[in-house]
Image (cartoon, grey):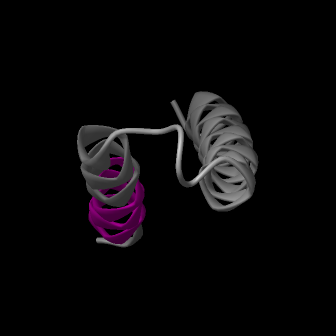
């Protein structure tokens, strides 16, 4: 059990890092093409960022 738990946490960390990188790309695209993207896309990006933060806090507990 102890050998499997660190592997799961490392995989979760990789997923969070990938999500952060993906959100940073979306944020850059939203700034670069701000006029073309609808407001719902910006709200979606904010909700994804908040979800990532919540998942990170849940993993620390």
Q: Nearer the viewer, residue 15 or 22?
A: 22
Residue range highlighted in magenta: 48-59
Numbered disc total: 0
Q: Position of residue 49 (x, y in %)?
A: 41, 59
Q: Nearer the viewer, residue 21 or 29?
A: 29
Q: Position of residue 59 (x, y in %)?
A: 38, 59
Q: Residue visible at 47% across and 39% down?
A: 37
Magenta: main secondary structure: helix
Which quadrant would residue 28 be assigned to in this image? bottom right
**20 w.r.t. 31: above or below:** above
Q: Nearer the viewer, residue 29 or 58?
A: 29
**14 w.r.t. 28: above or below:** above
Is-magenta flag for residue 57?
Answer: yes
Q: Position of residue 5 (x, y in %)?
A: 56, 38
Q: Residue visible at 69% across and 40% down?
A: 22
Q: Residue visible at 28% across and 71% down?
A: 61
Q: Residue visible at 56% across and 54% down?
A: 34
Q: Is residue 32 left or right of residue 44?
A: right
Q: Is residue 52 left or right of residue 27?
A: left
Q: Nearer the viewer, residue 30 or 56?
A: 30
**48 w.r.t. 5: above or below:** below
Is-magenta flag for residue 56?
Answer: yes
Q: Looking at this rendering, what residue extends furthest in the front direction?
A: 35
């Amino acid at each position: 059990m102890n050998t499997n738990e660190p592997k799961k946490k490392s995989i979760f960390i990789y997923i969070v890092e990938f999500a952060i990188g993906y959100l940073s790309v979306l944020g850059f695209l939203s700034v670069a093409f701000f006029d073309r993207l609808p407001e719902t896309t910006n709200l979606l990006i904010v909700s994804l960022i908040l979800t990532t933060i919540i998942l990170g806090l849940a993993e620390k507990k």
